[in-house]
Image (cartoon, coloured by chain):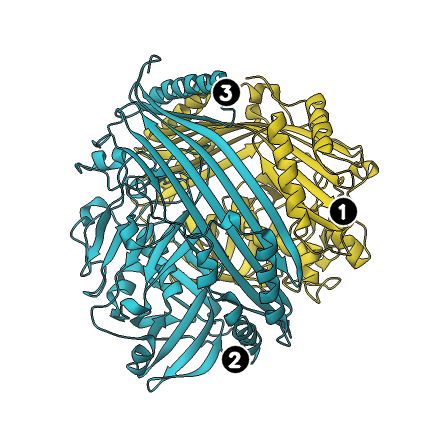
Chain colours: A cyan, B yellow
């Protein structure tokens, strides 16, 4: 502060990461990483500077602080208005996320034994040509200090695991994953998550489905009723609600890379985002569940909150930081500033963006029974959405046709597409609490330099009407 | 800021590590020092301005046909002992792999070097980056456009040593700018990068982005369908990036590549020749791979024929081939990949491509590309920041952005013209040397709202 900063904060972080993977009966990788460093953020002359270093000697930290100030002064040469921060009490706290079984106390040998047992089950299915399984564990210990008097010590342990079976035959590659694609399921838990996932018990079925897809019919190109499993709905929320509500995107600061948002300020508290059944929250509190977006305080010291995002279909709130909240006249940030590590400046990021389950008891089987004709799609295979988050297209690993209230023939290469608000307004049923899962998305990219963040998405199977099906393999008149 | 790493320190770290490890354990150390600074702007103002200084040690241990890796940022004596201990313990928890090769030998490192360090770039200050940002912002001010983007510089060095006597070192600098110009109904984009700050012209990029934003204002809606499309180099590389990993030999052995059963076949058009060439004057990157093995120039596709794959040592031994110096750091399950892609260009300027197109679409940039089908190699994604309708050989104005679902195999069989190849930067793949392409029957499947 002696260098002229009007505000400064630091995050001192210590991280440990273990990643173990197998492939076709052998080790894929075994990695053990630790990382320590400090990130210093300062406002000088009304502009931001940030510097980080992994050298925690007094001399290096002082040099980094001076560099942050010099950078801020350079920022001030091209500024529009001085940075203002919405007020937040300077919290003093120590918080340790619940963790029943420290994953780092479990031997790598035990990790590998389970993964190799899964691998064996997958490859026991004739036709499976590639089996991959993995586990990841992370401990993140952070001390946050601010010039306004905050001192927050947080420890979070994250665990994740999953696997996939691939089957190559006759010029076609099919894949099934469990419990989710692209790494599996991730939560704010210890090794107890691995036990809960029932990895081995599901392996044979997953391998069989990968092979069976080769005999399945191609998903047709049509318009119809669509039921999504909860993991695919979680990603649908991530892409078509989670990103558009990021206030920094709305205000233009991601325009060059991640893009902006259709959810401009004139639509704030007025837009009919979805049907009456669509209730979405941004909830970082432990009460919401052990999500990848669960914490006690965000990375600028704002206490975890539950913000209503969509209530009975009506858009209510963006997710914000202290700076962006102040820019739109909000009295307080709703606590969504997060950074990948000590070497990155926090950005507005999703916490747990979840759709609330339906009010009446409804199981996936009952939902299907209530559907005359349609499609059921499960487990993401591809995802893409435009840079304002309007037009999306998703592919899933597997699908089934629904006829007269029953799942009938299996479909390969399922996909669907649409426009965000039209899609959410077409939702006419969602399953109840017992079928709601808090999924973890460990690989959300945003920012320059790019940061990868884990986000949580609670979802239950839900039904949508008049959806465009099969776009990914669209044929035109005259195509072969 | 002075360097914390030199050859003497690297050798000392190897000595300390060997002292800490059991006598029967081979070691490979990768030491990376990086200083990266990035200035980010939007709404015509700098809103984020960051600096990062790191020195990291990664240790691979190998004994009794087992290997594992641990890494740390603690390079004091205790930190070195501790990271070696973690790597050794992780190694011992595995079953032996009879196919695991000994670590690379000193002779595998090769002697060929590349010079990609520029002292002037290493000395760029936050104030100089701010000046460049001011120039980019000014380029759109006259037309009332709003600018957003980045300006970044990097200085890094990597040293890789192992207990077999192999040593490989690479020092480099990097500079990059990217700019988006936003108007009320349109946008334009440009990006550039390379080892030397002095060879970049961010203001010229900003003027080009501004011109695209102006020319695409008030876009019309053109129906989805098959079109003749001119893909500017950034769009080409972002698509190509999703196909290049399939040229890793292990992905073919694992039967996850679209080249399964297709190596040695004529898969693409006569005008497709792609090499991997770290020594190309417009390329960047270290001349050795994750094991320290010297990279070789590899012809991947020649006149449409799939000629070669790239091989890590381990994959080469399995396939009975020679390693090409493209392996990722061990242990890993992906093997190798080409990272210095050069797509041989042609002689047709983009202006000439436009002039010879009765009806088509000009694409500046693509966004959110993902693989829809791994064997047909169908990719989906969106156009972004400058999409234009061409009619009767002229740009008729901007159009709303399209979603595409396009097979890369079909695309590489439908190239009607190629521009000279240039070093290009995108957002979905690493930088490449690629031409602009004019392709027929590009499959746009939907139109978005802007």
**Viewer-closest of B226 and A397:** A397
Residue that extends furthest to the bottom in the rendered view of this protein? A404
- Camera-side mark, 1 or 3: 3
The residue pinned by badge 1 equals B324
Q: Residues within 10 Å of mark 2 (few under 14, many from 20)?
A: some
**Viewer-closest of A234 and A298:** A298
The percent position of residue B187, horizontal first and vertical second, equals 37, 42
**What's the distance in space between the residues labelled 1 and 3, CA to CA?**
42 Å
Q: Residue at x 33, y 59 (%)?
A: A458
The percent position of residue B25, horizontal first and vertical second, equals 75, 41
Is A36 on the left or on the right of A151, as rendered? right
Q: Residues within 10 Å of mark 3 (few under 14, many from 20)?
A: few
Mark 2 on the same chain as mark 1: no
Mark 1 on the same chain as mark 3: no
On screen, B418 above or below B154? below
Residue at mark 2: chain: A
Labelled pair 2, 1 in contact (Cβ < 8 Å): no
Mark 2 on the same chain as mark 3: yes
On screen, A477 above or below A131? below
The residue pinned by badge 2 equals A216
Is B417 on the left or on the right of B202, as rendered? right
Query: Could you say whether the residue bearing mark 1 is in a helix, strand or loop?
Result: loop
Is A113 on the left or on the right of B446, as rendered? right
The residue pinned by badge 3 equals A57
Q: Is residue A264 visible?
A: yes
Residue that extends furthest to the top in the rendered view of this protein? A2
**What's the distance in space between the residues labelled 2 and 3, CA to CA?**
61 Å
On screen, B406 above or below B161? below
The mark found on residue A82 in the picture is: none
């Amino acid at each position: 502060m002696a260098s002229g900063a009007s505000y400064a904060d630091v995050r001192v972080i210590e991280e440990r990461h273990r990643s173990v993977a197998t492939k076709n009966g052998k080790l894929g990788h075994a990695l053990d990483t630790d990382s320590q460093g400090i990130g210093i953020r300062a406002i000088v002359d009304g502009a931001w500077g940030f510097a980080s270093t992994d050298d925690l000697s007094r001399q290096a930290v002082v040099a980094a602080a001076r560099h942050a100030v010099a950078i801020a002064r350079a920022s001030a040469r091209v500024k529009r208005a001085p940075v203002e921060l919405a007020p937040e009490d300077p919290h003093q706290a120590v918080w340790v996320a619940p963790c029943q079984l420290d994953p780092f106390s479990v031997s790598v040998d035990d990790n590998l034994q389970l993964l190799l047992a899964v691998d064996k089950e997958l490859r026991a299915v004739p036709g499976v040509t590639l089996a991959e399984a993995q586990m990841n564990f992370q401990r993140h210990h952070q001390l946050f200090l601010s010039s306004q008097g905050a001192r927050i010590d947080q420890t979070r342990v994250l665990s994740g695991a999953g696997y996939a079976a691939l089957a190559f035959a006759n010029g076609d590659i099919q894949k099934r994953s469990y419990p989710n694609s692209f790494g599996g399921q991730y939560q704010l838990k210890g090794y107890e998550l691995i036990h809960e996932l029932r990895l081995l018990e599901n392996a044979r079925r997953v391998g069989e489905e990968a092979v069976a897809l080769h005999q399945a019919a191609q998903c047709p190109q049509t318009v119809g009723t669509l039921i999504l499993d909860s993991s695919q709905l979680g990603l649908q929320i991530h892409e078509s609600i989670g990103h558009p509500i990021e206030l920094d995107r709305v205000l233009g600061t991601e325009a060059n890379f991640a893009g902006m948002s259709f959810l401009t300020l004139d639509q704030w508290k007025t837009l009919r985002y979805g049907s009456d059944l669509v209730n979405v929250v941004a909830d970082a509190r432990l009460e919401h569940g052990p999500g990848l977006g669960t914490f006690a305080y965000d990375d600028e010291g704002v206490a975890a909150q539950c913000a209503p995002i969509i209530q009975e279909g009506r858009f209510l709130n963006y997710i914000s930081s202290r700076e962006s909240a102040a820019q739109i006249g909000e009295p307080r940030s709703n606590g969504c500033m997060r950074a990948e590590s000590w070497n990155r400046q926090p950005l507005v990021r999703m916490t747990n963006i979840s759709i609330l389950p339906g009010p009446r008891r409804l199981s996936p089987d009952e939902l299907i029974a209530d559907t005359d004709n349609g499609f059921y799609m499960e487990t993401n295979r591809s995802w893409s959405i435009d840079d304002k988050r309007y037009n999306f297209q998703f592919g899933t690993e597997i699908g089934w046709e629904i006829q007269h209230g029953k799942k009938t023939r299996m479909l390969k290469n399922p996909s669907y597409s649409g426009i965000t608000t039209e899609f959410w307004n077409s939702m006419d049923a969602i399953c109840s609490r017992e079928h709601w899962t808090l999924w973890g998305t460990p690989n959300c990219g945003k920012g320059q330099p790019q940061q990868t963040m884990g986000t949580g998405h609670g979802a239950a199977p839900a039904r949508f009407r008049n959806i465009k099906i099969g776009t990914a393999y669209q044929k035109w008149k005259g195509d072969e | 800021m002075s360097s914390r790493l030199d050859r003497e320190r690297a050798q000392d770290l190897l000595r300390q590590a060997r002292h800490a490890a059991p006598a029967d354990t081979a070691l490979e150390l990768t030491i990376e020092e990086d200083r990266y600074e990035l200035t980010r702007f939007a709404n015509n103002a700098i809103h984020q301005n960051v600096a990062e200084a790191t020195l990291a040690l990664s240790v691979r241990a190998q004994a009794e046909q087992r290997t594992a890796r641990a890494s740390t940022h603690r390079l004091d004596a205790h930190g070195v002992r501790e990271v070696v201990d973690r790597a050794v313990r992780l190694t011992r928890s595995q079953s032996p792999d009879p196919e695991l090769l000994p670590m690379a030998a000193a002779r595998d490192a090769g002697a060929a070097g590349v010079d990609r360090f520029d002292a002037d770039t290493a000395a760029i200050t936050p104030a100089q980056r701010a000046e460049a940002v001011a120039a980019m912002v000014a380029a759109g001010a006259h037309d009332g456009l709003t600018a957003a983007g980045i300006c970044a510089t990097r200085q890094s060095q990597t040293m890789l040593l192992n207990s077999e006597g192999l040593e490989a070192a690479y020092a480099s600098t990097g500079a990059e700018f990217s700019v988006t110009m936003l108007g009320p109904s349109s946008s334009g984009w440009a990006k550039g990068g390379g080892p030397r700050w002095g060879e970049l012209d961010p203001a010229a990029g900003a003027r080009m982005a501004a011109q695209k934003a102006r020319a695409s204002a008030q876009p019309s809606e053109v129906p989805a369908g098959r079109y003749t499309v001119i893909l500017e180099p950034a769009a080409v590389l972002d698509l190509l990036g999703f196909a290049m990993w399939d040229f890793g030999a292990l992905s073919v052995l694992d039967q996850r590549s679209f080249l399964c059963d297709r190596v040695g076949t004529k898969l693409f058009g006569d005008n497709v020749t792609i090499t991997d060439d770290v020594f190309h004057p417009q390329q960047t990157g270290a001349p050795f791979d994750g094991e320290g093995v010297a990279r070789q120039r590899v012809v991947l596709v020649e006149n449409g024929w799939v000629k070669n794959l790239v091989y890590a040592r381990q994959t080469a031994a399995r396939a009975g081939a020679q390693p090409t110096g493209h392996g990722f750091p061990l242990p890993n399950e992906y093997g190798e990949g080409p990272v210095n892609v050069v797509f041989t260009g042609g002689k047709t300027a983009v202006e000439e491509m436009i002039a010879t197109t009765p009806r088509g679409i000009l694409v500046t940039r693509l966004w959110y590309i993902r693989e829809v089908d791994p064997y047909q190699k169908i990719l989906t994604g969106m156009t972004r920041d400058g999409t234009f309708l061409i009619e009767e050989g002229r740009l008729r104005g901007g159009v709303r952005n399209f979603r595409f679902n396009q097979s890369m195999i079909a695309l590489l069989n439908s190239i009607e013209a190629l521009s000279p190849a240039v070093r290009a930067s995108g957002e979905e793949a690493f930088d490449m040397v690629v031409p602009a392409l004019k392709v027929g029957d590009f499959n746009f499947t939907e139109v978005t709202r802007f």
